[in-house]
Image: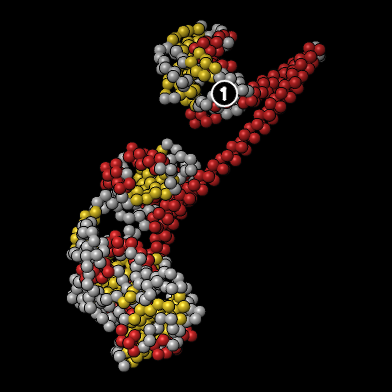
């Protein structure tokens, strides 16, 4: 077999981009460590072949076009029955002996299916190599015993590197883990100091292009026993049945790209072997083996190394799954506490932000912001409020994604470099389908020093060779936070789903409750109207017949009987007044509000004049400030002032001079009005009862009334989008407040006027 280095011309040297594009799964050649036959499965005829040892062709007829059981002097007859194009993975068929140079040479036989063909590989066996995997099992048994004692992934990888080197004798064995951008970092290493250490160095993704990574995923072990081999061509180049080169993705003897061999030489390695580490079917990393000089690893030793790689992959998967499970349990425990508080609260967002540590711990962040319904609540370490609002606006402008995360916000939004100390990393989830409502978590910049195996940014000359320097090259990484893990994004999305569910459920419950209230109110109004209307006539009849009875039988009634009749009439009149008030209250809820511009000073003057009879014989001092024009129903608003003035006059009747003041102050988008008196006042402990129907704070013997006037006031103002409340001091007076919306473009007002009626 030849070991002569191929002559490399300038045309043969490929740049890295060309390597990335090269169809490396169909190289059209094999490494010179054996033989390869492409067999048509129906007739078992050889249609392509590659033979590294020319002596075999001198000693035997060319196998092309021959049935497999007849080629090479019938050496492969024992394999014929086991060849099957349905073999999805390379299958070991045993050892066959082929005459070469007058001597029998043993070969390991493996076969697999490709392109509808059978690919049979024969790899020369060494004279002193183990005869089976079982023969080297005692050597690897200790590895399995130590696996259970390894505490974490790094320890597992260190153990695997040490064991593979012990089995194979490589100068350096390292474990290489990929990050999400397919850069690789050496996380474990075992060596004999013949080759330099690469521990903790990072290698750029361009060192292993995407198509190479795909081959690593599909074919777990690859050996290059010499970086200076001459490839053995497959003849013919194109399969005569398919018209294409044969796919060698799963072939152990597959030749590699010239640029990769040059890469090995630049690295100072004469041989290499890689064992793929897979997790959930995806490439997680590699066990990468290097030797300064060419080195062949026997088939069964490689099989044992492949077995170690599979066990290591399972252990890595188990360790990482356990770590994720622990984190997931902790995060869901936090989420459960947050949701428990939110579900029981009227304002669920206030409960969400009540415990700052819980919300930021959910995604392992430094700070968070909650934006909803015009609020922007900041927790922990966050950018200023205006910058958070700017970020939310840009998220909204991008289409309001359900989830957005980055560990380099400045790379996405250059203006964010100014907030790198609090928000180099951002994780945001939308909590509304209609509005720009978000929960946003923040992570600060983490300045890192990364050691690369050579400068990853240094350009390579076109049409030359891959980089030649693998010395440690330090790079300072800025404007990046710690990376968001899948568990962080998962926790944020689960919280989002729960919040959206709470919001929708609350909205549905509120809508249902509103419908029930509307129906109940209509039923109550109809009932009260019907009852009050139907009761008016009976009470009038009671009063009328009692008066007739008193008039016709007055001479026959004694004093006590006349008192009974008077009590009947007075009670009927009081009941009639209550019914009239109830009817008025019911009508107020059913009447249409006809809004027009109303000059309040004129309306107040009219309401005051209608109460002239109640002021006769008394000294009443009125102070009425200039009042604005509002949009309101004048009839309803006049009733408001009549009720308030009537109460003020009633509760000041024991004062020598009754003082009643009407004023107004503009506050934002509403006017706040007040009617103040110096009457008997009330205890603020009972202020909540003041506007209720038939609620009275004084005995009927002290002050007459039905207790429905202020209830009417509140109902009228609520229908005008206004509010009502009261303040009082027992024995000193009371103030009734109410609000009305400001008209569009209404100016402020000021001043007051004072007049006295006596």
Which quarter of the picture shows residue 462? bottom left
- What is the x, y in percent for residue 84? 48, 79
- Vertical side of 436 occupied by 314: above or below: below
Q: Nearer the viewer, residue 743 or 57?
A: 57
Dot 1 falls on a residue whose secondary structure is helix
Q: Nearer the viewer, residue 40 or 719?
A: 40
- What is the x, y in percent for residue 634? 56, 16
Quadrant where the N terminus is found in the figure:
bottom left
Give the residue pinned by disc 1: 716
The residue sitting at 42% across, 49% down in the picture is 403
The color scheme shown is secondary structure
Confirm whether residue 562 shows in the render: yes
Which quarter of the picture shows residue 611? top right
Mark 1 residue crowding within 10 angstroms, few (<14) / some (14–19) / many (20+): many
Confirm whether residue 158 shows in the render: no
Q: Nearer the viewer, residue 642 or 19?
A: 19
Count every numbered label the image shows and give the total: 1
- Vertical side of 752 occupied by 302: above or below: below
Q: Nearer the viewer, residue 518 or 386?
A: 386
- What is the x, y in percent for residue 478? 24, 51
The residue sitting at 60% across, 28% down in the picture is 693
- What is the x, y in percent for residue 567? 71, 20
> Would residue 185 appear left or right of 558 to someone viewing this image?
left
> Would residue 320 appear left or right of 293 to someone viewing this image?
right
The residue sitting at 24% across, 54% down in the picture is 477
Which quarter of the picture shows residue 234? bottom left
- Vertical side of 447 occupied by 9: above or below: below
The residue sitting at 29% across, 46% down in the picture is 410
């Amino acid at each position: 077999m030849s070991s002569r280095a191929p002559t490399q011309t300038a045309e043969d040297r490929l740049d890295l981009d060309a390597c990335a594009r090269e169809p490396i799964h169909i190289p059209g050649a094999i490494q010179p460590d054996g033989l390869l036959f492409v067999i048509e499965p129906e007739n078992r005829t050889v249609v392509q072949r590659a033979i590294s040892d020319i002596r075999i062709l001198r000693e035997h007829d060319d196998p092309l076009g021959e049935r497999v059981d007849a080629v090479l002097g019938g050496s492969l007859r024992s394999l014929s029955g086991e060849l099957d194009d349905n073999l999805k993975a390379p299958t070991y068929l045993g050892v066959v002996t082929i005459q070469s140079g007058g001597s029998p040479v043993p070969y390991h036989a493996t076969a697999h299916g490709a392109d509808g063909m059978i690919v049979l590989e024969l790899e020369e066996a060494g004279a002193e190599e183990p005869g089976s995997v079982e023969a080297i099992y005692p050597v690897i048994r200790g590895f399995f015993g130590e696996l259970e004692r390894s505490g974490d992934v790094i320890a597992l990888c260190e153990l695997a590197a040490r064991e593979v080197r012990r089995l194979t004798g490589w100068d350096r064995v390292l474990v290489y883990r990929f990050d999400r951008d397919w850069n690789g970092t050496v996380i474990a290493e075992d060596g004999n100091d013949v080759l330099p250490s690469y521990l903790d160095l990072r290698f750029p993704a361009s060192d292993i292009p995407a198509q190479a990574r795909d081959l690593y995923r599909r074919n777990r072990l690859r050996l290059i026993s010499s970086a200076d081999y001459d490839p053995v061509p497959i003849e013919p180049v194109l399969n005569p049945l398919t018209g294409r080169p044969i796919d060698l993705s799963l072939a152990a003897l597959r030749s590699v790209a010239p640029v990769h061999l040059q890469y090995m030489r630049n690295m100072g390695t004469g041989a290499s072997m890689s064992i793929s580490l897979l997790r959930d079917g995806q490439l997680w990393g590699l066990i990468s083996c290097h030797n300064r000089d060419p080195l062949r690893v026997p088939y069964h030793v490689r099989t044992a190394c492949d077995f170690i790689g599979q066990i290591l992959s399972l252990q890595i998967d188990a360790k990482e799954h356990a770590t994720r499970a622990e984190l997931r349990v902790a995060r869901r425990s936090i989420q459960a506490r947050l949701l428990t508080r939110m579900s029981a609260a009227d304002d669920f967002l206030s409960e969400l932000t009540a415990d700052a540590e819980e919300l930021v711990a959910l995604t392992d962040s430094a700070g968070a912001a909650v934006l909803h319904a015009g609020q922007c609540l900041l927790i922990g370490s966050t950018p200023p409020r205006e910058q958070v609002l700017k970020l939310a606006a840009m998220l909204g402008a991008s289409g309001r994604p359900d989830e957005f995360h980055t560990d380099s916000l400045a790379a996405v939004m250059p203006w964010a470099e100014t907030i790198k100390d609090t928000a180099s990393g951002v994780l945001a989830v939308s909590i509304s389908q209609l509005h720009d409502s978000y929960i946003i978590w923040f992570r600060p910049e983490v300045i890192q020093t990364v050691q690369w195996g050579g400068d990853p940014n240094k350009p390579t000359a076109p049409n030359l060779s891959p980089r030649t320097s693998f010395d440690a090259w330090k790079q300072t990484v800025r404007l990046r936070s710690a990376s968001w893990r899948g568990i962080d994004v998962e926790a944020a999305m689960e919280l989002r789903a729960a919040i959206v569910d709470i919001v929708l459920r609350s909205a549905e419950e509120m809508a249902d409750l509103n419908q029930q209230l509307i129906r109940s109110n209509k039923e109550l109004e109809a009932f009260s109207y019907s009852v009050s209307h139907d009761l008016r006539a009976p009470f009038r009849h009671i009063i009328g017949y009692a008066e007739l009875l008193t008039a016709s039988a007055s001479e026959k009634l004694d004093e006590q009987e006349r008192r009974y009749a008077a009590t009947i009439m007075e009670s009927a009149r009081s009941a009639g007044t209550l019914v009239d008030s109830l009817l008025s209250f019911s009508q107020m809820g059913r009447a249409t509000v006809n809004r027009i511009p109303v000059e309040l000073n004129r309306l107040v003057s009219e309401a005051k004049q209608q109460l002239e009879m109640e002021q006769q014989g008394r000294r009443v001092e009125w102070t009425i400030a200039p009042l604005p024009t509002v949009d309101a129903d004048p009839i309803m608003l006049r009733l408001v002032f009549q009720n308030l003035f009537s109460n003020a006059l009633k509760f000041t009747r024991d004062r020598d001079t009754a003082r009643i003041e009407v004023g107004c102050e503009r506050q934002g988008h509403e006017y706040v009005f007040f009617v103040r008196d110096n009457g008997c006042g009330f205890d603020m402990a009972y202020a909540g009862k003041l506007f209720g129907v038939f609620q009275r704070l004084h005995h009927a013997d002290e002050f007459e009334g039905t207790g429905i006037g202020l209830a009417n006031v509140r109902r009228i103002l609520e229908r005008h989008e206004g509010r009502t409340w009261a303040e009082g001091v027992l024995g000193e007076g009371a103030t009734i407040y109410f609000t009305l919306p400001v008209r569009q473009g209404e100016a402020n007002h000021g001043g007051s006027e004072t007049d006295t009626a006596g």
